[in-house]
Image (tube, helix red, strand yellow):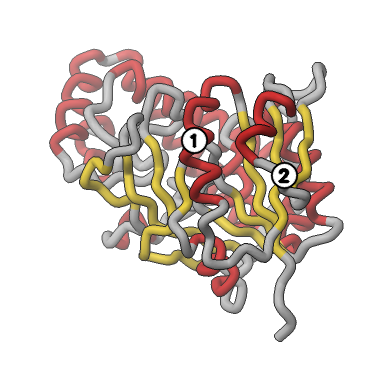
Amino acid sequence: MNKKTLALFTTIYPEGKRFLNDFFSSLWDQSDLDFDTWVGLDRIQENEVKPYFGSNDRITYIERKSDESPSSLRQRAIKQIMKNYDAIIFVDSDDILEPNRVEAARNMLKICDVGGCALTIINEAGKPLGSIFQYPKESIIASKIPLCNNVFGLSNTIYTTNILEKILPIPDNCVLVDWFLATSAWIRGARFSFDIIPRMKYRQYGMNTARIIPPFTQEYILKAAEMALNHYLLVISSLSHIPSQHKTQLEEQEDKIRTFLSIMKQDQDKLLLYIQKLNELPSEHIWWDMVAHPHLDNIWKN
């Protein structure tokens, strides 16, 4: 098999600038350096980040235009990358790559179209928190990926450009780009795989859109439920030719989250009990499983 051409894509924004030394140190320390780096610049200029890269001629910068949303910037970058590469490794610039991140991602292309990996959870200072973001062991959760939750983020996933061609475009108003891509790939019949060995260090701090470390608050659960509901509405309304079985599952999940959100907003006692029981569960969450968690259905369905 011919060696696959790889691009690594990340987005840099002002709030994450303080983490760039860690990020780029890990990028240049890869066991497999045969890849090109593409950088989306979101509200930050090339001259502000170029010193972190050094004199590397395998880097391409794409600046966000004044009329672009963050998802539009990503889509424009992805479309440009797709022209010349077999696959794209997505990483977050506030995270840290393990030395074999690229090598392991390349190997996954032998068996899948979309490949994720486990992540070691670190705090804002880069210290391990003793938790691993891992593919869930329980079938009640694992069997619903990526319909009800997600493990394929923009920090830990490789996509072949062949599957990306089938799932673009990304709507301009898309907030949860990673979940949208994974759900779209599922709808289009992609082959998924997950590496249970941590290949990234995932930083948990105030800027995270999707938290996975408790304690969860009332405000966060209500916000997360709103975002999950909007995700389903966007997928159903923007994707064409969704197979009937997939569309039925999406509509059922949308209705479930809508009902959950309505009850949580209207019944403070149930919301408080849900938060209490959620925070008592083992802290082995994946993205969005804390919204209408299957182990807590008895709290809000009765």
**Res 192 seen here:** no
Q: CA distance from mark 2 to mark 1?
A: 21 Å
Q: Position of residue 302 (x, y in %)?
A: 22, 32
Of the residues under marks 2 and 1, which one precedes in the sequence? Answer: 2
Relative height, residue 120 to residue 51 (above, below)? below
Q: Position of residue 189 (x, y in %)?
A: 64, 65
* Residue at image coords 74%, 67%: 5
Label 2 environment density (alpha carbons within 10 Å; few <14, some 14–19, many ≥20): few
Relative height, residue 175 to residue 236 (above, below)? above
Q: Secondary structure at mark 2?
A: loop
Relative height, residue 259 to residue 101 (above, below)? above
Seen from the viewer's position, the closer of residues 211 and 61 is 61
Looking at the image, is mark 2 or mark 1 nearer the viewer?
A: 2
* Residue at image coords 13%, 36%: 280
Residue type, numbered disc 2: Ser
Seen from the viewer's position, the closer of residues 18 and 251 is 18
Residue at image mark 2: 55
Image label count: 2
* Residue at image coords 32%, 21%: 264
**Res 224 seen here:** yes
Left or right: 296 as drawn, with respect to 149 = left
Residue at image mark 1: 94
Left or right: 32 as drawn, with respect to 161 = left
Q: Which mark is residue 157?
A: none
Q: Looking at this rendering, what residue extends furthest in the bottom direction?
A: 1
Seen from the viewer's position, the closer of residues 233 and 244 is 233
